[in-house]
Amino acid sequence: MPERPKQQRGSYPCPWAVNVCNEDNIERRLRGGSRVGLTKFVANDLGTTISDLISISLSSESGSTEVLFALVDSSIKTVTGGVFATPVAYLGETPDDPSGAADLLTDDAGNNILTSSVAAPASGFLVSGQQTVFAVTSSSVIRLNPKNGQTDLILASAGTVPTGATFGTVYRDRLIVSGGDNAIYSSKMGDYSNWDYGRDISDGSRAIVWQLALSSDVGLAPTAMIAHKDSSLIIASKTTLWVLRGDPANGQLQRVSDNIGIVSSKAWCKSDDTIFFLSDCGVYKVGADGSGLAMVSENSLPAELDDINTSTTTVLMEYEQERKMIHVYLKTAGGNDTHWVYELQTEAWWAVRLQNDHSPVAVCKHKGEVILGGNDGYVRKVGGSDDDGTAIQSHVIMGAMRLGSVDRGGIINMLHGALGTGSGTVTWRVVVGASAEEASDNAKLAIETFQAGGDYSGYVKHTDTWSAGRSLAQYPRVSSLWCCIWLQSTDRWSFEGASMQLKLSGRYR
């Protein structure tokens, strides 16, 4: 079947839109409409503050089971079959040691891990490996045994467990952490308690510390690590990108880029063997083996995604396979956050506004679905026609459109709109300006004022509604040089087209 040619858009197709998608998901027609909603993944909230989410596969008598883990309020909770539970954790003592003293335990692989039973941390970066979950914190690494729910502080059987780390990964059966300085710390292969970097270098499984640098250079502080199977590890600073092929002790470290990096530890997502990530200058993709680095948003990067201040904004990313979308969530302390979705098929960015309580503090993929840990302690998935029963408030600006000629204004004599069959009602408003930029800016300001509950009437020259199908002709009689048509709805809607009849007015002075 031949590839469908891209449909052409005008010079000013859409200067701003919020909570809309530009194509019908089934017919792939350019017709607009409300975005996909959010649906509670489980009925009850997990607690007050969700720190992180992770999904792992566990072996069982019936086969592999995918389990979602959540770090929340100094506890670790799991969900299987749509129900959350808090694993039994031995706090302060274990059945084998009522005194709570440190024990030399043996993990499932037969390796010794010196541990003492502790509560889960209040916050941390969750990583998984060998059917085990680890919470990496700035003061320690805590291990969760998902089979019995025990949480254990990993104490060093050799060397010193790194402190100050803020993120990590498990790669080639090594626990690898970083974030406290410019070093990358790798445990001994198969023994996550062994951090003895002074062992005989002939031991290929020894613990090792290294950095992102060539020769005698001093490496920059790492910002993200992405393990791909046991073949490669993508590591980045804010301004450089590297790939490690093979093991840290004897593999090959190659610099992929000396000016493109990843802004923070969660600012990336994977689709099969491709990694998408946010840099200081746009969204890029790279193969998991370090090949094919390329920008995916070169011609349409929103200004809000350029040079993000990660000290005040948390960046979270996830890939949605069903709709082939990259979700970029920007979480700030003040709320009223604007998030972004990038559609790979249409190469288009779309802004997303969520209720402040729904704005995610943690994101992961679980059983093929994008899962969000909300600001209110609930876990939701991307899907549905509304946000937990609340209608989605969607907005889109059409234009800007010239109403007259170079030196003369124009009058909108007639406006005729058509919505899809079965579409919800859409309110349309005319916003004007002396230039294309002014009309577009005024329309965006009107939407933002509307969302904030303010008085936006000063921006609007005429308003009316369209219902499903072809509407009756309407006569705004608005005069200006440029205009935008602002469409707004709380229904599920689709746009088929509109026609505008203009006539020239007086000369522009």
Image (spheres, helix red, strand yellow):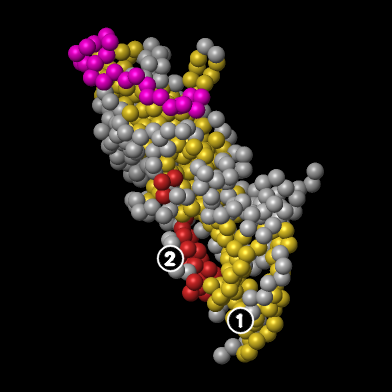
Residue 418 at x, y = what percent?
A: 71, 62
Res. 21 visible in picture: no
The residue at the point 53 percent across, 55 percent down is: 393
Location of the C terminus (image quadrant)? bottom right
Residue 508 image offset from top left, x and y in percent: 59, 88
Q: Is residue 173 left or right of residue 3?
A: left
Magenta part of the protein: which range? 79-102
Q: Which of 192 and 432 lies nearest the eye of the viewer? A: 432
Few, some or many residues within 10 Å of mark 1 (<14, 14–19, 20+): many
Name the residue located 51 percent from the left edge and 58 percent from the top edge.
302
Question: Which type of secondary structure does the marked residue at label 2 adopt?
Answer: loop
Which quarter of the figure is the N terminus placed in?
top right
Q: Which numbered dot is residue 501?
A: none
Q: Which residue is mark 2?
A: 454
Using the numbered discs, state the Cα–Cα distance from disc 1 to disc 2 in whole angstroms.
25 Å
Q: Is residue 78 magenta?
A: no
Q: Amino acid at mark 1?
A: Ser
State left or right for residue 76 relative to residue 302. left
Label placed on residue 479: 1
The image shows residue 337, relative to residue 318, as above or below, that is: below
